[in-house]
Image (cartoon, rainbow, N blue to C red):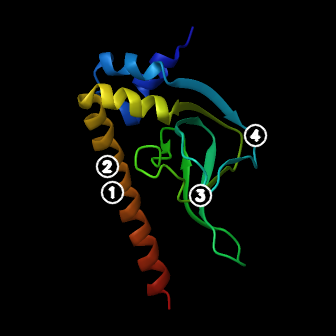
Amino acid sequence: METLERFIAEHPFFAGLESYYTGLLVGCASNVRFEKGTSIFKEGGDANEFYLIRAGKVALELIEPHRRPIVISTLSEGEILGWSWLLPPYQWKFNAHALEETRAIALDGKCLRTKCEQNHDLGYELLKRVAQIMERRLEATSLQLLDVYAAR
């Protein structure tokens, strides 16, 4: 039988994480499924989850008033969705919706913050990993902007 602990341990975001920490994370985890077109979260909403995408595709969008949403990133298997649970004021900065049926592991942000406060080593590990994802996505967004403006 497949377990949440195994899925967490095998997810690329947690590669190399000590099994002790994986055991702590399981207490905050649950399986979730989003049908195609389902809104996962909206900008300004309470950011109380963090998702490890197991299958499917999710659009991360920026909403500009009176215009169509701008897709800033498409996330898929092996990626994470949402880091706003980690940083006050714990509100989503973007919208996210499922582009196709998507399965993920949801980690409860409040539960994670409590565990990070109780175990600063775990908190530091999570912060380092989230910071690496932020850096990669910022770099990808910068390259997209260069492409847009180079075409002018």
Side (left or right) of 127 relative to 30: left
Crowdedness near tag 4: few (<14), some (14–19) or many (≥20) residues, C-alpha within 10 Å: some
Residue located 36% across and 31% down the image: 14
Going from the N terminus, do you reach mark 1 or mark 3 first? 3
Report the Cα–Cα distance between label 4 and label 2: 29 Å
**Is 60 rendered above or below residue 80?**
below
Report the Cα–Cα distance between label 1 and label 2: 5 Å
Q: Locate residue 68, reporting x and y percent.
A: 71, 73
Please name whichever residue, 99 or 83, is drawn nearer the observer in this view of the structure: 83
- Give the residue at mark 3: 44
Mark sitting on residue 135? 1
Q: Residue type at mark 1?
A: Glu
Q: Residue type at mark 3?
A: Gly
Report the Cα–Cα distance between label 4 and label 1: 29 Å
Looking at the image, do the residues carrying marks 3 and 2 touch, with CB atoms under 8 Å apart?
no
Q: Residue type at mark 2?
A: Gln
Report the Cα–Cα distance between label 1 and label 3: 22 Å
Q: How many marks?
A: 4
Crowdedness near tag 2: few (<14), some (14–19) or many (≥20) residues, C-alpha within 10 Å: few
Residue 129 placement: quadrant: top left
Crowdedness near tag 1: few (<14), some (14–19) or many (≥20) residues, C-alpha within 10 Å: few
- Give the residue at mark 4: 35
